[in-house]
Amino acid sequence: MKISVLGCGRWGSFIAWYLANRGNEVWSWGPEEDYSYQILKTTGRNEYVELDRKITLSCDLQASVERAETIVISISSQGLRGFMQRIMRYDVSQKTFVLCMKGIEVETGKRLSEVLVESGVSPDRIAVWVGPGHIQSFVQGVPNCMVIDSANDALKHDLVERFKSDLIRFYYGNDLIGTEIGAAAKNVMGIAAGVLDVVCVPLKGPLMSRGAREVSRLIKAMGGNELSAYGLAHLGDYETTLFSPYSHNRQYGESLAKGQRFQKLAEGVATSGAMKLLGEKYGVDLPITKAVYEVCYGEGDDCERCKEAIGKLFTRSTKFEMYE
């Protein structure tokens, strides 16, 4: 299969490496001025993977799009709509899109597959690939489980058969709303976990339980299956996000609670704003999400703001554990 992976950062470079090793003809695209592209072009590797000789590195977006049967996108979620405006200049009517990114558009609350549909891509040609796993572990041969979901059953079955290996065991997703919301929301919980690593470590257990329940309420209100919150896309990704030293979102929360600045991308920051918007739209109580939003966007001392956010959660009125 001819595949072009658009985005050659941390996750995109791994996806290109993985799919090339699955026997696909892979191009890895990045903007010529981008640091991730330049480091691969100059050294043939980055801090995560070595650029396999079977992979063609390119900064030509048109050529990368037009030669591909399947287009994998791995960029910052908030830049997707603008990026799709560039891609839709070319004929993509017969191409499959796979989103390997986790987020919700902050201005609109739209899921990323919805952004593609609104950009002009047929829903039957869109899939999402999410779930647990860090590149640092994968490249050492440590296996994990992930999920591919789509509104098109035939497409997700075909992609799973083509992409599965001893390194990644794939499952078929059966709730696109829950898969996308769950995958994005786990980054918000990752920030909360980082704060707790500094302020109150024992609360990470309750965070896992209450966080998944919070997300399940939102998924249900949006028309998805609330049980999806307990699947690979969300709860299944908690170990990778809430406890791993590699998690950008957890590191962001830890840095915030220490009054430090974390310079790398943490998708959970924007996602907390998008989820807050969705909670208000659907009338869903999202206390942990609101707390994360407050510590990310509030004013004043970062350390004190983190402590206050946890305190507010503990002074909320008593509720039944599985309240709606």
Image (tube, rainbow, N blue to C red):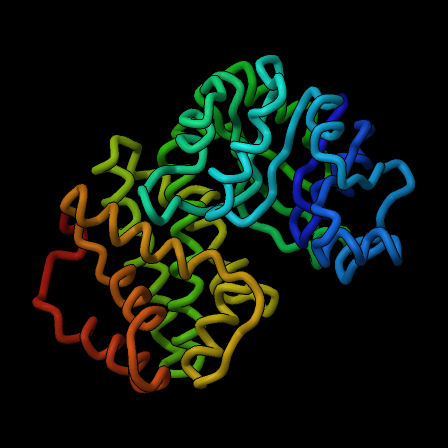
Residue extending farthest left = 317
317 w.r.t. 282: above or below: below
User: Looking at the image, which residue is at 47% across and 17% down?
Assistant: 122
Q: Nearer the viewer, residue 82 or 231?
A: 82
Q: Residue 136 at x, y = what percent?
A: 70, 59
Name the image quarter holding the N terminus. Answer: top right
User: Looking at the image, which residue is at 41% across and 61% down?
Assistant: 269
How many discs appear?
0
Q: Residue 18 at x, y = what percent?
A: 75, 40
295 w.r.t. 162: above or below: below
User: Looking at the image, which residue is at 46% across and 21% down?
Assistant: 120
Q: Is residue 4 left or right of residue 213?
A: right
Q: Is residue 61 left or right of residue 185?
A: right
Q: Is residue 128 left or right of residue 306?
A: right
Q: Is residue 91 left or right of residue 68?
A: left
Q: Residue 81 at x, y = what percent?
A: 47, 38
Q: Quadrant of residue 219?
A: top left
Residue extending farthest right = 53
Q: Residue 117 at x, y = what percent?
A: 43, 25
103 w.r.t. 224: above or below: below
265 w.r.t. 63: above or below: below
Q: Nearer the viewer, residue 139 or 66?
A: 66
